[in-house]
Structures are given as structure tokens and as C-alpha cells.
Image (cartoon, rainbow, N blue to C red):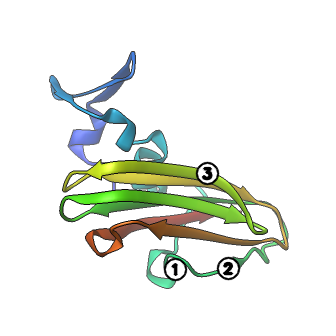
């Protein structure tokens, strides 16, 4: 997965997201972390671990150093009360909330996990309409 042509033309100006000259409403649902995760495979050191990770599962950072984690999710249909959030050592660290998600809305969280700490990325709300898109990590 590389950086798509559509993302190369994104601009965020004064809270509005412009894409190929069009305005995307509710730009808050497309965080910069989501864009970072989509292009993370082009950065040195990020590992795509999407196939071995899932929501609501505790992982442990055993890398010997801090671990940066970026996770993105996307709604496959209209959904309500979507909350994507991360926890490190049992404490919530980052959250993305949408009370009324449209199909195709994207959500992301980014967290730094100290070595030896447990971490998880959780999803709540109308979760049957949300898919894990990308989970990348860098130690």
C-alpha cells in the first residue's frame, strides 16, 4: 500500500480539508495520523502489523525502546457513536469520536508506548460497520 494520488493532493487549511479542489465536510474524521499510516510503508522503520493485530486486544511492547503505534479504521456503512481510542498501561491516551459516521469515514489514533508497557487500541459504538485498515509500529 503506497501513497495514493488522492492523498498527494490533500491540503488542510483553516480546518477545512481540500481534495482535488473539492471540499470534504467534517474534516475532523480524517486525522493526519490516518494519512501518516497510509504512507507509513514509505517511511524507514515502520512495520505493517495489521494482519497480526485486532481491536480490544492487549499487546506488550517488548522492543527494548519506545514504540510508536498508528492505527486507522474505516466505516463500511453509516454508523453511530464511533469511538476509536488507545490505552497504555490501562490509561486512555488518544481518542477519535464521531457521533454520526458516514460510510467511508476514517479514524485514527497515534500513541507512543514505553518499553515494557501494555497497550491496546479499542473500538466502541456501532462496531459492526468499522474495519481495521492499517496498524503500523515503529520502535
Q: Tell me the crowding category of disc 3: few under 14, some 14 to 19, or many 20 or more residues within 10 angstroms, Cα based.
A: some
Residue 36 in the image: state x and y as whole percent: 47, 47
Q: Is residue 39 visible?
A: no
Is 116 situated left or right of 19 in this image? right
What residue sits right under mark 2 in the picture?
A: 59
Which residue does the image show at 52% across and 80% down from the upper left?
53
132 versus 66 height, above or below: below
Mark 3 residue element: strand
Give the distance between the C-alpha atoms of the residues marked 1 and 3, in whole angstroms.
Answer: 18 Å
Give the distance between the C-alpha atoms of the residues marked 1 and 2, in whole angstroms.
Answer: 9 Å
Is 21 situated left or right of 45 in this image? left
Is 58 situated left or right of 97 in this image? right
12 versus 89 height, above or below: above
- The numbered mark, 1 or 3, whose residue comes first in the sequence reads 1
Q: Nearer the viewer, residue 80 or 3?
A: 80
Q: Quadrant of the C terminus?
A: bottom right
What residue sits right under mark 3 in the picture?
A: 94
Residue 20 in the image: state x and y as whole percent: 16, 28
Mark 2 residue element: strand
Q: Quadrant of residue 76?
A: bottom left
- The numbered mark, 1 or 2, whose residue comes first in the sequence reads 1
Is 62 situated left or right of 128 in this image? right
Q: Tell me the crowding category of disc 2: few under 14, some 14 to 19, or many 20 or more residues within 10 angstroms, Cα based.
A: some
Which residue does the image show at 22% across and 40% down from the upper left?
6
Amino acid at each position: 500500500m503506497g501513497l495514493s494520488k488522492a492523498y498527494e493532493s490533500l491540503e488542510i487549511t483553516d480546518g477545512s480539508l481540500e481534495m482535488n479542489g473539492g471540499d470534504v465536510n467534517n474534516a475532523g474524521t480524517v486525522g493526519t495520523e490516518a494519512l501518516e499510516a497510509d504512507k507509513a510503508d514509505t517511511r524507514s522503520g515502520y512495520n505493517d502489523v495489521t494482519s497480526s493485530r485486532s481491536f480490544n486486544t492487549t499487546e506488550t511492547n517488548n522492543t527494548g525502546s519506545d514504540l510508536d503505534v498508528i492505527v486507522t479504521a474505516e466505516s463500511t456503512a453509516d454508523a453511530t457513536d464511533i469511538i476509536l481510542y488507545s490505552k497504555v498501561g490501562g490509561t486512555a491516551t488518544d481518542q477519535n469520536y464521531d457521533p454520526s459516521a458516514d460510510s467511508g469515514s476514517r479514524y485514527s489514533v497515534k500513541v507512543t508506548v514505553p518499553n515494557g508497557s501494555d497497550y491496546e487500541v479499542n473500538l466502541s459504538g456501532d462496531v459492526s460497520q468499522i474495519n481495521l485498515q492499517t496498524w503500523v509500529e515503529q520502535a
